[in-house]
Structures are given as C-alpha cells and as structure tokens.
Image: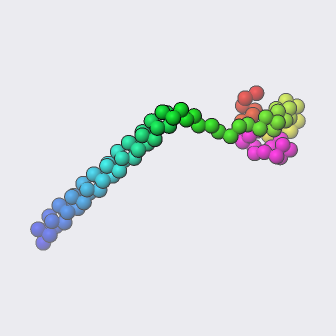
Amino acid sequence: QTSDSITHSILELINNMLIDLLATMARLDNEKRIERIKQGLARSGYKPTGKKANEAKHKRIKELLVVGNMTKEEIAKAVNCGVATVYRVAKVI
C-alpha cells in the first residue's frame, strides 16, 4: 500500500507540473499574440475612436446645470439621456 501512495503522489506531482507548464505556455502565447496585434495596429496607424459627443445634448445639459433648479436625474429625463452623461458633462464644466 505504501508503493500505491508513493505512485499516486508522484503521478499527482507530474500532473500538477504538466498543468502548470501548459498554463504558462498558454499565457506566453496569449501575451505574444496581444503584442503582435498591438504592433500591427501601430504599424497601420490605427487610432481608436469612440462615439462622438452629441453637442446639442451636451449644450442643453450645460444650460440646465447652470440654471441649477433641477437635479441631475431630472436633467437626464428632460434631455433624454443617461444620468452618467449628465455627470460627465458636469465634470467638464
């Protein structure tokens, strides 16, 4: 029975080492792939562009914020946008 427990321990150790090795190889492969993607995007002159701000909505939000008689939630409902947008515009003012 001692040899069974020793064999079991050795097999478990080998399995853990193989799992660690495969995990490390996968991580390195993923890092290399991400780096190559970044290099390709940099070479092509790619610049990420987000959605442009709706200037009319932002202007209306600024006007309502300056007046100051409405809460940010009320402004969001009045302008038909999210509360986060109102806070984003308020942060710029």
Q: Is residue 68 visible?
A: no
Residue drawn at x 29%, y 56% is 19
User: Is residue 81 covered in magenta?
Assistant: yes
Magenta-drawn segment: 73-87
For residue 56, what is the image quadrant? top right
Residue that lies at the very extreme toward the bottom in this rendered image = 1
| Quadrant in the picture for the N terminus | bottom left
Query: Percent position (x, y) of residue 25?
Result: 31, 49
Q: In this view of the protein, which residue sits in the foreground, 60 or 33? A: 33
For residue 90, what is the image quadrant? top right
Residue that lies at the very extreme toward the left in this rendered image = 3
Query: Percent position (x, y) of residue 72?
Result: 80, 40
Q: How is the protein colored in the picture?
A: rainbow
Q: In this view of the protein, which residue sits in the foreground, 86 or 69? A: 86
Q: Is residue 47 left or right of residue 64?
A: left
User: Is residue 60 covered in magenta?
Assistant: no
Query: Percent position (x, y) of residue 12?
Result: 23, 61
Residue drawn at x 50%, y 37% is 41
Residue that lies at the very extreme toward the top in this rendered image = 93
Residue 12 vs 38, above or below: the answer is: below
Q: Is residue 84 left or right of residue 42?
A: right
Q: Is residue 28 visible?
A: yes
Residue 13 vs 59, above or below: the answer is: below
| Quadrant in the picture for the C terminus | top right
Q: In this view of the protein, which residue sits in the foreground, 22 or 87? A: 22
Query: Percent position (x, y) of residue 21?
Result: 27, 51
Residue drawn at x 42%, y 39% is 35
Residue drawn at x 17%, y 61% is 10
Dominant SS of magenta comes to helix
Q: Is residue 17 left or right of residue 3?
A: right
Q: Total of numbered circles in the picture? A: 0
